Image (cartoon, rainbow, N blue to C red):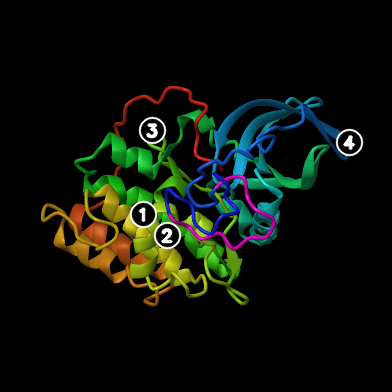
Amino acid sequence: MDLAMPKCPRCFFSCDRKGGLRFCPRCGLAGPRERAADRAPLRVALGREIFEIAERIGIGSICTLYRCRTLTSGATGLLKIARDACTNDLVTNEAEILRLLQNGNAYKQFRAFLPRLEHSFTVDDPNEAPRQANLLQMHEEIRSSDELYSLAEVRACRPDGLDGRDIAWIWRRLLYVLGYIHSRGAAHGAVLPMHVLIDPREHKLLLIDWCGASRLLDARAPASVLAGGYLDWYRQSGGLRQPVTAALDISLGARCMIELLAGDGGSGEMPPSVDAAIQRHLRRCLSGWGEANAWKLLDDFDRLIAALWGERRFKPLDLPRKEATKQLCPI
């Protein structure tokens, strides 16, 4: 199969990028020209630091993810390399947005929710065009990427849905960090189940994959490579061909919560067992052109859950212990 053809035979995505990709940028289906796109150098020198590449731990439609460490201090990180030079612009865009977030005065309050950009650079390949790479680190409070579950994995573990009190802490943290992102004049654009990671035991949350993010002032339509199987979510949120907005982030995040409640993220329908007040709150967030103030929504949600359940208490989220895996969601 030659993916320079107009449509991918699996997901029917029409690729409009120049040069011809070796894989479908939406679903990752590889063609016969997939040769060295997933190779990484054993070592990368960045300034005075030398990073040693360890094992590959994930392959996404845009990037391949490797674990790495510095030879000087032994600090570990995550190296994200574009699988094809045709997507270098998306990896560069991620670096620009993460820099914008890291330069905020309040960044220290929110850094545990975001991957930290350490370096952005180009990887040379003697056989192919150079590919863009980002070196990322997680906050020290996130002990290990092997302990994180994407919301897609949470839904798979609990197909009958979570208790409303379980989704409450996830939604609170997601609104909290979205409020900061929007206050910095940016939007994520792909708040989807595979991009929201949680540690269920310690109630931590990490929002990943910033390739399709944008500045709100010059927002563009969301990168369709990130939509994957969630095109209906974008359609229902009014954001399929419209610029990325704060409201789109909130709508997509609410659809993630509805899925965790065993509902339908596309239609917004929830089981009757979900408290009516929770249903009203989430439906209020669904329109991509609706209310776009994440922090106000967080205040409203706090009042709602206080009325429902009283003083907040830590409620452990029981999920099967996750074995260390090399197939992590690409950060």
Mark 1 is on which residue type? Answer: Trp
Mark 1 vs mark 4, CA separation in Å: 41 Å
Name the residue: 64% across, 32% down: 66
Q: Is residue 67 above or below residue 286?
A: above
Would you call the spot at circle 2 few (<14 residues within 10 Å), some (14-19), or many (20 or more)? Answer: many
Q: At 39% across and 72% down in the image, what residue appears?
A: 288
Q: Is residue 127 magenta?
A: no
The percent position of residue 116, horizontal first and vertical second, equals 65, 46
Which residue in the protein does label 3 denote? 201
Marks 4 & 2, CB-CB < 8 Å contact: no
Q: Pointers 3 and 1 in contact (CB under 8 A)?
A: no
From what the image shows, is residue 94 above or below residue 251?
A: above
Earlier along the polypeptide chain: callout 1 or callout 4?
Answer: 4
Amino acid beneath label 4: Arg
Tell me the residue that label 4 is attached to: 48
Badge 2 or badge 3: first in the primary sequence? 2
Where is residue 84 drawn, in percent x and y?
Answer: 67, 46
Please state the horizontal and vertical placement of residue 234, each as a whole percent of the image. Answer: 39, 65
Q: Main secondary structure of the magenta part?
A: loop
Residue 104 locus on image (x, y percent): 66, 62
- Mark 4 neighbour class, 10 Å CA radius: few under 14, some 14 to 19, many 20 or more: few
Q: Are marks 2 and 3 in contact (CB under 8 Å)?
A: no
Distance from disc 1 to disc 2, alpha carbons, whole Å, reads 6 Å
For label 1, the residue is: 171
Residue at numbered disc 2: 175
Q: Which residues are magenta?
A: 12-23
Q: Is residue 279 left or right of residue 112?
A: left
Q: Is residue 16 magenta?
A: yes
Tag in front: 1 or 4: 4
